[in-house]
Image (spheres, rainbow, N blue to C red):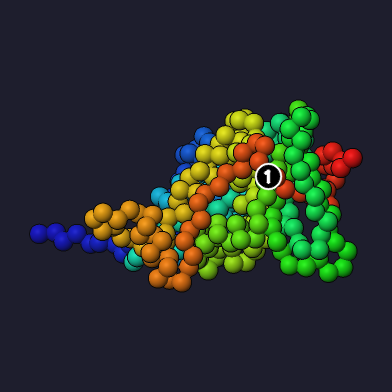
């Protein structure tokens, strides 16, 4: 009788590396890649990211590969500024990933669309010059001005994003600091030690404003792909983290979540808000090179 000898299973790191390199060799990444990111470079960056983020090795191999496919589809580098972060967080006995697209990556995608002349995002501080208004009768819906104060700028009071389209129209989205913090409170990725919410609040505030702005951009293939990914991020990231509960009979999920938040000392989750054309917009900071100031007060 022959006894089969079982080989020890490969460490998760090796399995993950093998799975990623297999997708590269079989052309899986190439099938969805854009001209802005080669599969070879993406794999190189992915392996560096995994080495720097040990908890990614505890996540499902298929989930990591799926997130890398999203990076390839958007043409955004994994694990770097201007790209897309893969954030592991503990859930139950295991780990899962939340993908977070950096605001600089969203700006790049908008520019690639060919419909955007200029796009900018920043935070507003208490001592900055700040003006914004709407002129529905003009060609630009939104007029805004933001100039950084010289010297002490004061505390952050909000974040905004503004875009000038090829047709001359200007659109913008503005959130107060409370609105940004409410978005952070709904985000389960913010609870990870690797979350950009912890390491770079300002960048995530700008990303939140750009996320609102994306609802107002033309539906090009690039922007539509980004919208789909952002919608997936929202759905994945807004679920309450470690609360896997079933509402008692007769009690709605919203009421239960509010009860749980109250028990944790948190305010009720504010309703989701989407800035529509013609609603209150924002203002602009020291405009980037090439961005024309949209209109004037006079």
- In the displayed structure, does residue 233 sit left or right of residue 142? left
- In the displayed structure, does residue 281 sit left or right of residue 248? right
| Residue designated by label 1 | 280
Q: Position of residue 67 (x, y in %)?
A: 49, 48
Examine the image and state in which quarter residue 217 appears.
top right
Q: Quadrant of the N terminus?
A: bottom left
User: Which of the two residues, 225 or 25, is positioned nearer the viewer here?
Assistant: 225
Q: Residue at x 76, y 35 (%)?
A: 135
- In the displayed structure, does residue 99 sit left or right of residue 222? left
The image shows a total of numbered marks equal to: 1
User: Which of the two residues, 78 or 184, is positioned nearer the viewer here?
Assistant: 184
Q: Position of residue 285 (x, y in %)?
A: 80, 52
Examine the image and state in which quarter residue 80 appears.
bottom right
Residue 135 visible in the snapshot? yes
Q: Position of residue 179 (x, y in %)?
A: 60, 57
Q: Residue at x 68, y 33 (%)?
A: 113
Secondary structure beneath label 1: loop
Residue 56 visible in the snapshot? no
User: Which of the two residues, 264 or 82, is positioned nearer the viewer here?
Assistant: 264
Q: Position of residue 201 (x, y in %)?
A: 64, 63
Q: Is residue 201 above or below residue 229?
A: below
Residues packed near mark 1 inside 10 Å, few (<14), some (14 to 19) or many (20 plus): some
Q: Residue at x 71, y 31 (%)?
A: 115
Q: Is residue 113 above or below residue 192?
A: above
User: Which of the two residues, 124 or 34, is positioned nearer the viewer here?
Assistant: 124
Q: Residue at x 38, y 64 (%)?
A: 259
Q: Is residue 2 above or below residue 121?
A: below
Q: Quadrant of the C terminus?
A: top right
């Amino acid at each position: 009788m022959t006894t089969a000898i079982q080989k020890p299973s490969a460490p998760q790191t090796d399995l993950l590396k093998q799975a990623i390199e297999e997708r590269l060799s079989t052309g899986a990444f190439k099938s969805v890649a854009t001209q802005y990111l080669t599969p070879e470079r993406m794999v190189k960056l992915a392996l560096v990211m995994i080495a720097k983020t040990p908890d990614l090795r505890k996540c499902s191999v298929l989930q990591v590969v799926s997130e890398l496919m999203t990076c390839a589809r958007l043409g955004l580098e994994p694990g770097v500024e201007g790209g897309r972060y893969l954030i592991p967080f503990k859930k139950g006995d295991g780990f899962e990933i939340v993908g977070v697209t950096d605001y600089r990556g969203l700006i790049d995608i908008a520019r690639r669309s060919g419909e955007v002349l200029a796009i900018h995002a920043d935070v507003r501080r208490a001592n900055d010059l700040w003006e914004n208004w709407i002129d529905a009768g003009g060609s630009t819906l939104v007029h805004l001005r933001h100039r950084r104060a010289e010297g002490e700028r004061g505390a952050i009071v909000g974040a905004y994003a503004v875009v000038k389209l090829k047709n001359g129209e200007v659109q913008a989205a503005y959130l107060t600091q409370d609105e940004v913090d409410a978005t952070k409170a709904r985000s389960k990725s913010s609870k990870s030690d690797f979350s950009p919410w912890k390491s770079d609040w300002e960048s995530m505030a700008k990303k939140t404003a750009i996320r609102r702005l994306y609802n107002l951009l033309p539906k090009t293939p690039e922007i539509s792909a980004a919208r789909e990914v952002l919608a997936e991020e929202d759905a994945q990231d807004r679920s309450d983290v470690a609360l896997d509960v079933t509402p008692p009979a007769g009690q709605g999920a919203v009421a239960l979540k509010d009860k749980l938040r109250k028990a944790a000392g948190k305010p009720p989750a504010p309703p989701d808000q989407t800035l529509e054309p013609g609603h209150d917009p924002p203002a602009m900071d020291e405009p980037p090179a090439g961005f024309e100031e949209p209109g004037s007060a006079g």
